[in-house]
Amino acid sequence: MTGARVTGAGGNGPLLKVENLRIALQGDGVTFNAVENVSFEIGRGEAFGLVGESGCGKSITALSVMGLLRRPLSLGGGRIVLDGEEIQDASAAEMRRLRGKRVAMIFQEPMTALNPLSPVGRQIAEMFVLHQGASWREAMDRAEEALRQVRVPSPERRIRDYPHQLSGGMRQRVMIAIALACGPDLLIADEPTTALDVTVQAEIIDLMAELCAAKGTAILMISHDLGLVANMCNRVAVMYAGRIIESQVADAIFATPSHPYTRGLIDSLPRLGERARRGRQRLTEISGVVPSIQAYPAGCRFNPRCPAVTDICRTTVPEATSLPADGIVRCHHHG
Amino acid sequence: MAEQLLSLDDLAVQFKVGSMLAGGIKTLKAVDGVTLDVKPGECLGLVGESGCGKSTLALAIMGLVLPTRGRIHVGGQQISGDKPPDRMEMARTVQMVFQDPYASLNPRQTVRRTLADPLRLHGVGDKAEVEARVIDLMAKVGLRPEHADRYPHEFSGGQRQRIGIARALILKPKLVICDEPVSALDVSIRAQIINLLLELKDEMGLAYIMISHDLGVVEHVSDRVAVMYLGRIVEQGGWQEIFEDPRHPYTRALIAAIPDPFHRAAATVAGAKAKGEIASALNPPPGCHFNPRCPLKADLCTVETPLLGTVAPGHLAACHFRDRII
Ligand SMILES: Nc1ncnc2c1ncn2[C@@H]1O[C@H](COP(=O)(O)OP(=O)(O)O)[C@@H](O)[C@H]1O
Ligand SMILES: Nc1ncnc2c1ncn2[C@@H]1O[C@H](COP(=O)(O)OP(=O)(O)O)[C@@H](O)[C@H]1O
Ligand code: SF4
Ligand SMILES: [Mg+2]
Ligand SMILES: [Mg+2]
């Protein structure tokens, strides 16, 4: 990581503070809490990871920070503070100003975010025109430079390509160029490499980490892949069924996972090199299935699958317990 | 040497793509001269990036696409371009488990019908025997008897994959091709299915071809591993050779690309990363297909195609520098 960290306008304090976030999901006559009690902080220039299985609420947490929740989802409570400023009640116009300039986001499938009818260079240039008042001519030059920075080969030609003419990896590079165009303080990356092959994934992750470190941009990295996130982030929070159940420094989460779910996940994955060291061991299974939002269990939501479950787990939601180095765990019987 | 269950002999599958109007018709070499064996009871891991030809290879072995060149021997049958397989006999020899169990199951058929139909079609036993075999196999894959009358949508993803596995096994095949069998499942469910596949393999004496992009899974389940790149096998060998002593730069790049939260020995991965992306199968680079991305590339690599050469008995690599240790 870089030693020097940029300090934004808000001075000290975290860049992003999410406090007791609750996201309501309006069903037929009932409201579910798709996310509840979610709190985390991201420092300036820090890479923070949010990990969990599909459906646990990672994407909607990110969308709420972007002010992009749409019906049937809505903000049910909590505070979102960006650089000292509360933005959870910001108007649509204010949020539009923040997006791109202060906070930018990239998605798993860049095709959904790119305009299929517009050359990619123009889509990057648009950011400079809209947010920085650049002329189109100047903006196009800067777009070419931006493509070079994300290491698209022959940017002077690629600038005229339409999204469908590019590979998945090249499209994601274009998305990164658009997202970083105006030098945002925070880049939210929601499963940015899930659709890509592993060697391409490795390149895109290196690129993101390098560019963000150079510009002092903080990253909120979202993925179902704990290994990927732990590798690139300073700190990691693990979500399960709409709640953060553990958060630790990245190395510590693998060395000393504290929540039975985190431990179960780490133990259940076949690790490269393990078989050569210890021979083939039966994988440790996590029993049962991920609950659906309509059927989240009472108490600790992991309780029907947990090997350490007791009566209190079925009735009482566990409070956050502190772990070393600012970590927390929510489990009545944490390790 | 044990009798082979499956032998591929210089297998090639080509597709004609494009149209006469737009740019003309081109030949896409999806599988380009693959020679490979699988013994009874053996698990062969097959890895490589999307588009490298893994699924086409699987479909050819299933007899669902015909070879353009070369031959497939599977069980007692020989398949070639002018000799399509006997479908009924194939179904009793090779079966497939797909990535997306939902898409591969008929939504209007109960589990019982899904499993019983193939038995009836193949005239296996009377009504009572069919029922007994269905219930017995359901138990083996971890489904309860009362699940028999339910439809696919009533199950979770993991249970649907159990149904998909049961359907593949109901005719007691000798070889099962698993094409990314856990990638569509919740992470916390994957271990259940991997354990199940390994148990069934031992119990029923199955051979597997395990296609997966998850190298951790491949190392865990495979006896031997083959690495594909743009239609060709670029390295094959025992699981330990492939993962502990990889000799093709592409194999090394794949291993180096896996995020390593446990800080694996740096030796195999240092300087091994690949540049850029896989080329189009319509227009592969001359010489070694991997050369534009390769950290070891030399002039020779752009003109001469490296053949699979022996590193050690049973360990082959198609790289001009397969003996160069890094
Ligand atoms: N537009 C929507 N309408 C209804 N439910 C939604 C919508 N978006 C998300 N959800 C539900 O909210 C929960 C969290 O979703 P999401 O944040 O997308 O999960 P993740 O990104 O962790 O996979 C899921 O149960 C999902 O089904
Ligand atoms: N039916 C088909 N017609 C034309 N091209 C095909 C067809 N099936 C596969 N291909 C092409 O063959 C190559 C190999 O595809 P595939 O076997 O699906 O790869 P993998 O399973 O390794 O991702 C790809 O370039 C793909 O686009
Ligand atoms: S033959 Fe050359 S280009 Fe191909 S893998 Fe070996 S070193 Fe790399
Ligand atoms: Mg998501
Ligand atoms: Mg495939």
Image (tube, rainbow, N blue to C red):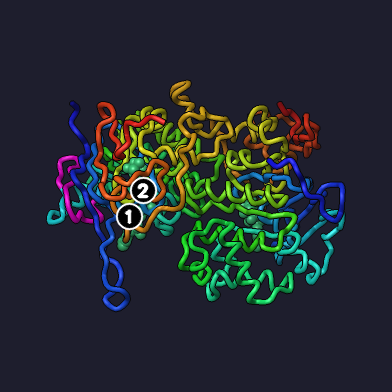
Question: Residue farthest to the left?
Answer: B82
Above or below A117: residue A232? above
Q: Is residue A168 left or right of residue A180?
A: left
Identify the residue position indicated by label 2 in the image.
B291
Same chain for marks 2 and 1?
yes
Which residue is denoted by mark 1 in the rendering?
B285
- Residue B208 seen by the camera: no
Horizontal side of A83 relative to B151 (left or right) equals right
| Residue lying at the far bottom of the rendered structure | B21
Quarter of the rendering containing residue A132: bottom right
Pick the front one: A96 or B131: A96
> Given the image, what chain letter belongs to the residue carrying mark 1?
B
- Numbered disc 2: what chain? B
Q: Quadrant of the N terminus of chain A?
A: top right
Q: Quadrant of the C terminus of chain A?
A: top right
Give the extent of the magenta segment. Answer: B63-78
Q: Amino acid at mark 2?
A: Asn
Is the CB of the residue bearing disc 2 within 8 angstroms of ligand 3?
yes
